[in-house]
Image (cartoon, rainbow, N blue to C red):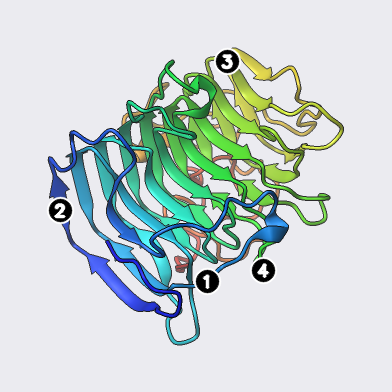
């Protein structure tokens, strides 16, 4: 754990190759195996315009660490940024399995954090049932310009105790968005399996689709206990939502929690298949260009690995996504998206010429 005075900074810190097991199992309030940033947060903002970042962490590499059977989240990072001298600010290729935690990987008040290539599984909410509990990856309060991509998140069941609608999120983004200096969060190439709520977007204020809070594209969200996606939990917001698979949700494929004229997901070329109900009762838009066919995963109906969510060569989702002109941005297989791309976190398993392998981190 590292905390700092008002003038101090931690610069270019590297934490790699550590293993944690059997730690903090008796904890009943949120703790983390690694905690970096100010010893306390600022007053919770009432809106994004009041966000203030003191940038106590400048540059960070947190990679190739593993934890299992723990009573804590893996890492809590707040007030972080990057600079020309320390350009890397990334949490990647870590593994967290079997944890009782508030959030597995938690980022607060930070600018431009990349979280990618992590595997987060079997996260159980704390017995205290605090707000937004038992989540896989969370970007909360005043984050801006970060990316969450190519993670594999599974078995995040939540519970029926306490704030039952506020636990068990695979990925959650709360009170973060465009009024930060770097814009919203990009979420792409993730596979989220058997979360209570696959993707949760709340209180991320955005005035218009010209400046959307977050860009959500090419994710695969399968067998959510309740909702595949929930957006606009208490505040009107706009987010783009393209080329995602939402399959097998126990309640709604996409659920808009806030009543009102705003708060839309701007949708195109998604797949909603075999959900109990595709759209919640407050959702005011539908995807007019959806490809609502069986994805036809190579791993069958319920793949056991992230790679099992590749599409078969005969899938109706192959090469039918919205072309976002993303250049070298890659899918879950470290392969550049084709033009047009396939729907979901992977390109087709076969039948396409190999695309250039380039890096984006």
Q: Residues within 10 Å of mark 4 (few under 14, many from 20)?
A: few
The residue shown at (29%, 62%) is 63
- Alpha carbon of mark 3 to alpha carbon of mark 4: how far? 36 Å
Instruction: Indicate the secondary structure of the residue bearing disc 1.
Output: loop
Q: Residue furthest left?
A: 22
Looking at the image, tell me whether mark 2 or mark 1 is earlier in sequence order: 2
Looking at the image, tell me whether mark 2 or mark 3 is earlier in sequence order: 2
- Alpha carbon of mark 3 to alpha carbon of mark 1: how far? 41 Å
- Alpha carbon of mark 4 to alpha carbon of mark 1: how far? 13 Å
Instruction: Indicate the secondary structure of the residue bearing disc 2.
Output: strand
Looking at the image, tell me whether mark 4 or mark 2 is earlier in sequence order: 2
Q: Nearer the viewer, mark 2 or mark 1?
A: 1
Q: Nearer the viewer, mark 4 or mark 1?
A: 1
Q: Which mark is residue 251?
A: 3
Q: Residue furthest bottom?
A: 85
Residue at label 2? 19
Q: Are marks 3 and 1 in contact (CB under 8 Å)?
A: no
Picture coordinates of residue 3, whole percent (x, y): 34, 66
Pick the quarter of the image with the N terminus. Answer: bottom left
Give the camera-side residue of 71 and 251: 71
């Amino acid at each position: 754990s590292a905390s700092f005075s008002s003038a101090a900074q931690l610069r270019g810190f590297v934490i790699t190759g550590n293993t944690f097991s059997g730690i903090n199992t008796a904890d009943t309030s949120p703790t983390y195996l690694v905690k970096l940033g100010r010893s306390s947060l600022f007053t919770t903002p009432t809106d994004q315009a009041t966000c203030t970042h003191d940038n106590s962490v400048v540059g960070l590499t947190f990679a190739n660490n593993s934890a299992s059977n723990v009573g804590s989240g893996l890492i809590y990072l707040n007030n972080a940024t990057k600079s020309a001298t320390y350009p890397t600010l990334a949490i990647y290729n870590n593994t967290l399995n079997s944890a009782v935690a508030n959030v597995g990987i938690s980022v607060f008040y930070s600018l431009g954090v990349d979280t990618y290539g992590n595997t987060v599984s079997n996260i159980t909410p704390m017995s205290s049932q605090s707000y937004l509990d038992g989540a896989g990856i969370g970007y909360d309060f005043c984050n801006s310009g970060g990316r969450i991509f190519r993670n594999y998140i599974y078995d995040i069941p939540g519970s029926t105790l306490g704030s039952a609608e506020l636990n068990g999120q695979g990925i959650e983004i709360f009170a973060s968005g465009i009024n930060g200096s770097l814009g919203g969060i990009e979420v792409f190439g993730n596979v989220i399996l058997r979360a209570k709520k696959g993707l949760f977007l709340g209180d991320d204020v955005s005035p218009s689709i010209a400046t959307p809070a977050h860009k959500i594209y090419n994710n695969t969200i399968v067998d959510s206990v309740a909702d595949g996606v929930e957006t606009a939990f208490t505040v009107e917001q706009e987010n783009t939502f393209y080329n995602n698979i939402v399959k097998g949700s126990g309640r709604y494929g996409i659920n808009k929690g806030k009543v009102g004229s705003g708060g839309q997901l701007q949708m195109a070329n998604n797949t909603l298949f075999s959900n109990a109900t595709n759209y919640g009762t407050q959702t005011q838009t539908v995807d007019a260009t959806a490809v609502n066919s069986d994805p036809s995963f190579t791993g069958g109906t319920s793949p056991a690995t992230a790679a099992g969510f590749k599409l078969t060569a005969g899938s109706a989702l192959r090469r039918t996504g919205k072309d976002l002109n993303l250049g070298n941005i890659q899918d879950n297989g470290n392969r550049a998206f084709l033009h047009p791309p396939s729907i979901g976190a992977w390109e087709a398993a076969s039948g396409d010429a190999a695309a250039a392998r380039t890096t984006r981190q």
